[in-house]
Image: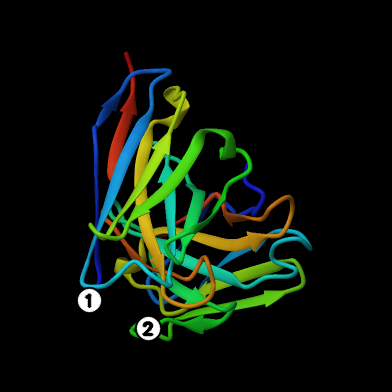
C-alpha cells in the first residue's frame, strides 16, 4: 500500500482526455512539489512534470499537472496510442528523516 | 549528455549482500543528487536513497539499516549495497540523477539492473 494513492488503471479512446489522481497528505504533497513519471513497458521511467505543473522540455502540451492541497492530478488530453504506459506520481515526504515517495502507479490503456 | 549504466551480479543468495555500481559518463558526479530506485517485478517504484555532492546521504527509513550508498569520484561511479537480502529485494534497480535542486527531479536514468535473490 503506497502512501501516495493512485488508481490502478484508467482508459480512454484515442482523442479523449483522461485524468490520473494522486492522493497524499500534509507531509508530502501538501508541503512539497509533485512530479509525474511515465514508464513505457521494459523501459526506465521518464520525467514528464516537475514542480507540480511544469512540463519538462520536449513533453507535449497534451500532458498537464495540477495540485490542490494534498492531492495532485495528471491530465492527458488528445489521448494517443503511444501514451499507453504506467504513470507514477512522486513527492518528498518530510516525516522521520525524510524520504522520496512514489505512488503505486496507474496503467493508462488506450482503447 | 550524461549517461548512466548500472552493473552487478544478477543473482544474489538470501542473507548475502547485493552490490551494484552505477557508471556515469558525460558528466561529473559532484554537486548533484544521485538516487537509487528499485522496482519489484510487476510492482511500483520504491526510492532507496540518495547521495549528494559526493558525500551526504539520506536513506529510506524502511531500508536504512541495510543500505549504503557511496561514491568513487576517481572512477565516476556510484555504488549501492543492500545487506541481508531476502526474496523481497528482487527487482530492477535504477540509478538516477536529479538536474535541479529537487531530489525527485530525476531527469536522467540508467536502464536498470535486474537482481534476483534466490538460493
- Any mark on residue A18, and which? none
Q: Residues within 10 Å of mark 1 (few under 14, many from 20)?
A: few
Q: Quadrant of the C terminus of chain B?
A: top left
Q: Residue at x 42, y 45 (%)?
A: B38
- Classify mark 2: helix, strand or loop: loop
The foreground one among A46 and A11 is A46
Q: Position of residue B47 (x, y in %)?
A: 51, 50
Viewed as shown, does residue B81 lie left or right of B7? right
Q: Residue furthest top?
A: B119
Asked whether disc 1 touches disc 2, contact meaning CB atoms under 8 Å apart, the reply is no
Question: Is residue B102 shown above or below B5?
Answer: below
CA gap, disc 1 and disc 2? 21 Å
Q: Position of residue B50 (x, y in %)?
A: 49, 56
Viewed as shown, does residue B106 lie left or right of A28? left
List the residue tagged with mark 1.
Answer: B1
List the residue tagged with mark 2.
Answer: A60
Q: Residue at x 33, y 84 (%)?
A: A58
Amino acid at each position: 500500500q503506497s502512501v501516495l494513492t493512485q488508481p490502478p488503471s484508467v482508459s480512454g479512446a484515442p482523442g479523449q482526455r483522461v485524468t490520473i489522481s494522486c492522493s497524499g497528505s500534509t507531509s508530502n504533497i501538501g508541503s512539497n512539489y509533485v512530479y509525474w513519471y511515465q514508464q513505457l513497458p521494459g523501459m526506465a521511467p521518464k520525467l514528464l512534470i516537475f514542480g507540480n505543473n511544469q512540463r519538462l522540455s520536449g513533453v507535449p502540451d497534451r500532458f498537464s499537472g495540477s495540485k490542490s492541497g494534498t492531492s495532485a492530478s495528471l491530465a492527458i488530453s488528445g489521448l494517443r496510442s503511444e501514451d499507453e504506459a504506467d504513470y507514477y506520481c512522486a513527492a518528498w515526504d518530510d516525516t522521520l528523516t525524510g524520504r522520496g515517495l512514489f505512488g503505486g502507479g496507474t496503467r493508462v490503456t488506450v482503447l | 549528455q550524461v549517461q548512466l549504466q548500472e552493473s552487478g551480479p544478477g543473482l544474489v543468495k538470501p542473507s548475502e549482500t547485493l552490490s551494484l555500481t552505477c557508471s556515469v559518463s558525460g558528466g561529473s558526479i559532484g554537486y548533484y543528487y544521485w538516487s537509487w530506485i528499485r522496482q519489484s517485478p510487476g510492482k511500483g517504484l520504491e526510492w532507496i536513497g540518495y547521495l549528494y555532492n559526493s558525500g551526504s546521504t539520506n536513506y529510506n527509513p524502511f531500508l536504512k539499516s541495510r543500505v549504503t550508498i557511496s561514491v568513487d569520484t576517481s572512477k565516476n561511479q556510484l555504488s549501492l549495497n543492500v545487506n541481508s537480502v531476502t526474496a523481497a529485494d528482487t527487482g530492477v534497480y535504477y540509478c538516477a540523477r536529479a538536474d535541479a535542486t529537487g531530489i525527485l527531479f530525476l531527469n536522467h536514468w540508467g536502464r536498470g539492473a535486474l537482481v534476483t535473490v534466490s538460493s
